[in-house]
Image (cartoon, helix red, strand yellow):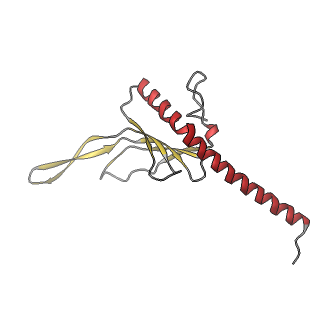
């Protein structure tokens, strides 16, 4: 079985593309660890403070290279309750939602919204994907804002 020159060229291009993807993944992960994670944390803390938004901004690192920065609006009493017997009443808890910047396996950043929901009252909606960005695509929303993060 012989391989044509065109097939050899196509194969070499595919190998080069594969190597570029591996290099990009390595570079994206390094950017996350060296700067992007901390920039996101700082920027989100700043804007939530300016907005007087009651929330928690935190980094989550349960799995290496699948880390996240999360703005969680926490939980609260929903105002709904259920009887549990003998005159007792159990308050249903409302999860207030979150904004998540999740590092993906390839180093890109998935931005998603977790919608609010009330436990035991319907099913929570699946998260809404805003977009998937390369680290360099995340930019500040305004020219005078902290450079390098938040929006495309």
Q: Residue at x 69, y 53 (%)?
A: 21
Residue at image position (60%, 44%) is 30
Q: Which residue is outermost to the left?
A: 86
Taking the view exactly as shown, the residue that stands out farthest to the top is: 144
The image position of residue 55, as x and y in percent, is 37, 34
- Residue 26 percent coordinates (x, y): 63, 49
Q: Quadrant of the N terminus?
A: bottom right
Q: From the viewer's perspective, is residue 58 above or below residue 125?
A: above
Looking at the image, is 141 positioned above or below residue 109?
Answer: above
The residue positioned farthest toward the right in the image shown = 5
Residue 77 at what x, y percent from top left? 26, 41
Q: Is residue 71 above or below residue 20?
A: above
The mark tally for this picture is 0
> Residue 48, located in which quarter of the rendered image?
top left
Residue placed most toward the observer, 28 or 104 = 28
Point out the image quarter for the C terminus: top right
Residue at x-position 61% and y-position 40%: 135
Q: Nearer the viewer, residue 82 or 42?
A: 42
- Asked which quadrant contains residue 45, the reply is top left
* In the displayed structure image, the side of residue 76 where residue 114 appears, left or right: right
Residue 102 lies left or right of residue 16; in this view the side is: left
Residue 138 percent location from the top left of the image? 60, 36
State the residue at coordinates (39%, 51%). 124
Q: Nearer the viewer, residue 127 or 81?
A: 127
């Amino acid at each position: 079985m012989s391989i044509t020159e065109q097939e050899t060229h196509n194969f070499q291009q595919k190998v080069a593309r594969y190597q570029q993807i591996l290099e990009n993944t390595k570079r994206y992960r390094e950017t996350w660890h060296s700067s992007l994670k901390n920039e996101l944390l700082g920027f989100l803390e700043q804007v939530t403070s300016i907005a007087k938004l009651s929330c928690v901004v935190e980094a989550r690192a349960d799995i290496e290279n699948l880390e996240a920065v999360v703005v969680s609006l926490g939980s609260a009493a929903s105002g709904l309750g259920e009887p549990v017997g003998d005159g007792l009443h159990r308050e249903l808890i409302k999860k207030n939602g979150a904004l998540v910047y999740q590092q993906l396996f390839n180093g890109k950043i998935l931005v998603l919204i977790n919608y609010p929901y009330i436990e035991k009252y319907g099913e929570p909606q699946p998260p809404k994907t805003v977009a998937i960005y390369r680290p360099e695509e995340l930019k500040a929303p305004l020219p005078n804002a902290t450079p390098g993060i938040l929006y495309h």
